[in-house]
């Protein structure tokens, strides 16, 4: 890489435009002059179509591609199996093949659902994967195809993503809390909530080091600091939200995860060990509680502005 090239902004093409991670990643990139991010939704880059991928790569000629496209509905995956595999496996292969042909490194988001959840102490990158359902298996296949077709890759496994937009546990909980006096929540699942903004921070930090010569391709884990349960996470959401509005919910009812999700089991433990990311890139975990406060502040700030305009 020439010194002149190093002075230019790092051009990153982000798939899955409109998704929560893609949105927050691009917002962070706009605040850093080292990056030039382009985000494309499915109408402009369809991962199921090699021709669509080729067209986008030829048009934008990125230094890196970040894939945030995924079929993430765990229960629906059991019924819409073909589409799930199309996005989570075949789509990743298509990206890997096209990026590999042009020597463009590919950063790909994966999931804690590759594991069966039997290790309460958490999973490292070296632990054997054992998905419980179609969603996890499709993501496992996507990882294997990426490793096969594009050696220059980063697989970043993340867990319990929340943000101020999209369809995620935080926003679903707030909607329930405004209408229900009691909310049922699983008390038999533990993990580490992770904000989409935090995931974006990690991706950009990794890319910056890769661009400066780090030879550290492979699979990594990242999640917010502090293990909790779904029940305790819900408690934290409601406590923080009550600073901004009065909620109807007065009680939380602990139930089994199987009661809430009849289609397929979830991992009892989704804890990801993040030591490899720290030792390789020096990236530390951030407390999810701080991230939760920041995301809720953003949600209610946006809500206030919207209400003011409509009023």
Image: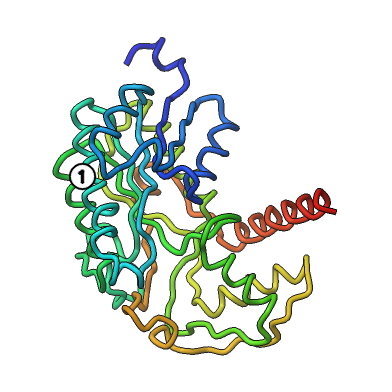
Residue toward you, 50 or 237 = 50
> Which residue: 27% across, 74% down?
116
**Picture quadrant where residue 67 is located:** top left
**Left or right of residue 247: residue 235:** left
Residue at x 56% of width, y 59% of height = 287
Q: What crowding class fits label 1: few (fewer than 14 Cα within 10 Å), some (14-19), or many (20 or more)?
A: many
Q: Nearer the viewer, residue 145 or 220?
A: 145
Label 1 element class: helix
Residue at the far right in the pictured view: 311
Q: Position of residue 269 (x, y in %)?
A: 37, 74
Q: Which residue is mark 1?
A: 93
| Quarter containing the N terminus | top left
Residue 79 percent across, percent down from the top left: 29, 71
| Image quadrant in which you'd find residue 77 | bottom left
* Image position of 268 with respect to 292: above or below: below
When the figure is inspected, residue 168 is found, relative to residue 16, above or below; the finding is below
Q: Position of residue 296 (x, y in %)?
A: 67, 59
Horizontally, residue 170 falls left or right of residue 274, namely: right
For this view, does 226 lie left or right of residue 125? right
Which residue is drawn at the image coordinates 66% and 76% (left, top)? 177
Image x and y of residue 110, in percent: 33, 54
Q: Is residue 66 left or right of residue 134?
A: right
Query: Vertically, is 181 above or below 102?
Result: below
Given residues 145 and 122, the one toward you in this image is: 145
Question: The C terminus lies in which quarter of the figure?
Answer: bottom right
Q: Relative to 132, say whether 129 is above or below.
A: above
């Amino acid at each position: 890489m020439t010194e002149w090239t190093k002075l230019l902004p790092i051009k990153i093409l982000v798939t899955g435009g409109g998704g929560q991670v893609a949105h927050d990643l691009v917002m962070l990139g706009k605040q850093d002059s080292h990056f030039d991010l382009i985000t494309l939704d499915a109408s402009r880059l369809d991962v199921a179509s090699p021709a669509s991928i080729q067209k986008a790569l030829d048009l934008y000629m990125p230094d890196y591609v970040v894939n945030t496209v995924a079929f993430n509905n765990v229960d629906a995956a059991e019924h819409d199996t073909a589409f799930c595999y199309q996005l989570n496996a075949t789509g990743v292969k298509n990206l890997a093949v096209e990026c590999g042909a042009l020597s463009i490194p590919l950063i790909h988001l994966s999931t804690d659902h590759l594991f069966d959840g039997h290790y309460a102490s958490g999973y490292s990158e070296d632990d054997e994967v054992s998905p419980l359902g179609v969603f996890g298996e499709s993501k496992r296949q996507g990882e294997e195809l990426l490793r096969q077709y594009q050696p220059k890759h980063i697989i970043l496994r993340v867990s319990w993503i929340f943000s101020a937009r999209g369809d995620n546990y935080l926003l679903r909980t707030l909607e329930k809390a405004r209408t229900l006096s009691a909310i049922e929540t699983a008390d038999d699942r533990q993990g580490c909530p992770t904000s989409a903004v935090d995931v974006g921070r990690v991706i950009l930090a990794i890319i910056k080091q890769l661009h400066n010569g780090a030879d550290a391709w492979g699979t990594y884990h990242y999640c917010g600091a502090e293990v909790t349960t779904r029940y305790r996470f819900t408690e934290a959401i409601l406590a923080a939200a009550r600073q901004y509005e009065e909620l109807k919910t007065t009680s939380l009812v602990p139930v089994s995860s199987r009661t809430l999700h009849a289609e397929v089991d979830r991992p009892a433990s989704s804890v990801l060990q993040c030591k490899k990311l720290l030792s390789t890139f020096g990236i530390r975990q951030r407390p999810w509680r701080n991230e939760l406060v920041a995301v809720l502040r953003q949600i209610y700030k946006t809500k206030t502005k919207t209400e003011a305009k409509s009023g």
